[in-house]
Image (cartoon, rainbow, N blue to C red):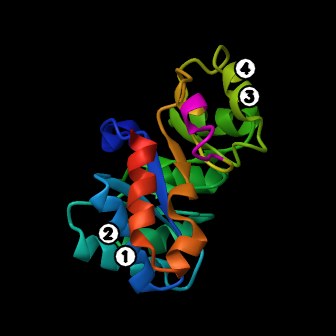
Amino acid sequence: MKLFSEMMAGQTLLPIIQADSVAQGVAIAGAMAEAGLKVVEVVLRSDASLKALTAIKQQYPELIVGAGTVLDTEILAQALDAKADYIVTPCVTPDLLAALASSGVPAIPGVANCADIALARDAGFREVKLFPASLAGGIPFLKAVSSVFRDISFCPTGGINADNCGDFLALPNVIAVGGTWVAKKDWVEAENWQAITDACRDAIG
């Protein structure tokens, strides 16, 4: 099974698609693809999310499309049925970690403290998501745990924006950052897809 970092293939932005409809999801993904991104994450936070994920994969087969906000094994099963290419969780439990490990697709479990990191590490994961990064200690936390969990790499999400993403990416134990700032809600509501493309381009330099 590929690691999350191998799947990202050097892409350091994990752009988050939060859509209220299938059409919204497809349009957001298209704007991100236009910026040159190859990996996107659809968060499962609306009734349309799973259908949007499937539609994006059909419309843009070159994209790697993951499912985020996977809270438990039931949602994991739904995401896998929708053919998610990878899984992102906001949290960890022993049952969820075991299911992720046996899912057959790359996964990046969400951690918020040292106990979570240890749980994920025991389950075989060496790449995790720090969430919510800004409330879970942010850059000072990542620096502090780097000497303890020397074999763990992070994808911080939650509170990441255009102003601080570079500071996070400068840390040696950060492989990517995730965020919604490249697809702001008002842009989506106004169907300003060019703004999303421009923000994604700015974020990846």
Residue at numbered disc 2 = 30
Q: Amino acid at mark 1?
A: Ala
Q: Which residues are magenta?
A: 160-167
Q: Amino acid at mark 2?
A: Gly
Q: Is residue 100 left or right of residue 167?
A: left
Rounded to the nearest angstrom, the CA distance separating label 3 from label 2 is 35 Å
Q: Are marks 1 and 2 in contact (CB under 8 Å)?
A: yes
Does 60 appear in magenta?
no
In the image, residue 34 lies at what x, y percent?
28, 60
Most distant residue in the top direction: 147
Q: Nearer the viewer, mark 3 or mark 2?
A: 2
Residue 157 sits above or below residue 3 on the image: below
Is the magenta region chiefly helix, strand or loop? loop
Rounded to the nearest angstrom, the CA distance separating label 1 from label 4 is 40 Å
Rounded to the nearest angstrom, the CA distance separating label 1 from label 2 is 5 Å
Residue at numbered disc 1 = 27
Rounded to the nearest angstrom, the CA distance separating label 4 from label 3 is 5 Å
